[in-house]
Image (cartoon, rainbow, N blue to C red):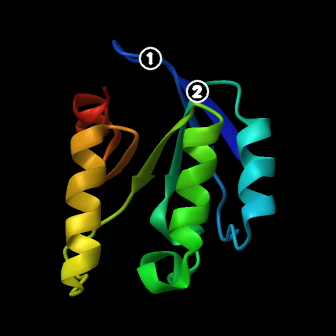
Amino acid sequence: MDIQIIPTEKRDLSYCRMNDEIINTTSEFLDLMVLCPTDTIVIHKENLPPAFFDLKSGIAGEFLQKTSNYHRKLIILGDYSDFKSKSLKAFIYESNKTGQVIFTRDIDQAVKLLK
């Protein structure tokens, strides 16, 4: 994994390039948080297990609770237009409104949504 610090007008971002690695567990997510020197972590949706996007699994809730507990922000880059679940779309919309966790295609859009 390579972590690149990206300075922006709002805050510095820890951009994690993980190739084909998947963050499968809360423990692995906490390990990632420890490695990131900034309070805002950027990952790609492909680095999350498919169960993350099944809200019934609880994995998304566990990961996002950790970001809240440790006062971090999380940006998950990807294309979300193919998701059919209304509850997931509502979750993404509400998350983007609060700015704590942001789901978007690119870093520029994510920075605009950061609070």
Relative vertical location of residue 76 with respect to residue 41 in this rendering, above or below: below
List the residue tagged with mark 2: 39
Left or right of 30, for residue 79 = left
Going from N to C along the chain, the mark reached first, 2 or 1, is 1
Q: Position of residue 96 (x, y in %)?
A: 26, 47
Q: Which amino acid, by three-letter code, is at mark 1?
A: Arg
* Residue visible at 44% across and 17% down in the picture: 11
Relative vertical location of residue 47 with respect to residue 70 in this rendering, above or below: below
Q: Pick the residue in front: 97 or 15.
A: 97
* Secondary structure beneath label 1: loop
Q: Position of residue 109 (x, y in %)?
A: 23, 39
Q: Position of residue 26 (x, y in %)?
A: 73, 63
- Labelled pair 2, 1 in contact (Cβ < 8 Å): yes
Left or right of 34, for residue 13 = left
The quadrant of the image that shows the C terminus is: top left
Relative vertical location of residue 10 with respect to residue 35 in this rendering, above or below: above
* Residue visible at 58% across and 78% down in the picture: 49
Q: Which amino acid, by three-letter code, is at mark 2?
A: Asp
List the residue tagged with mark 1: 11
Q: Pick the residue in front: 32 or 115.
A: 115
Relative vertical location of residue 92 with respect to residue 7 in this rendering, above or below: below
* Secondary structure beneath label 2: loop
What's the CA distance linking mark 2 and mark 1?
Answer: 8 Å
Farthest top residue? Answer: 9
* Residue visible at 39% across and 55% down in the picture: 77
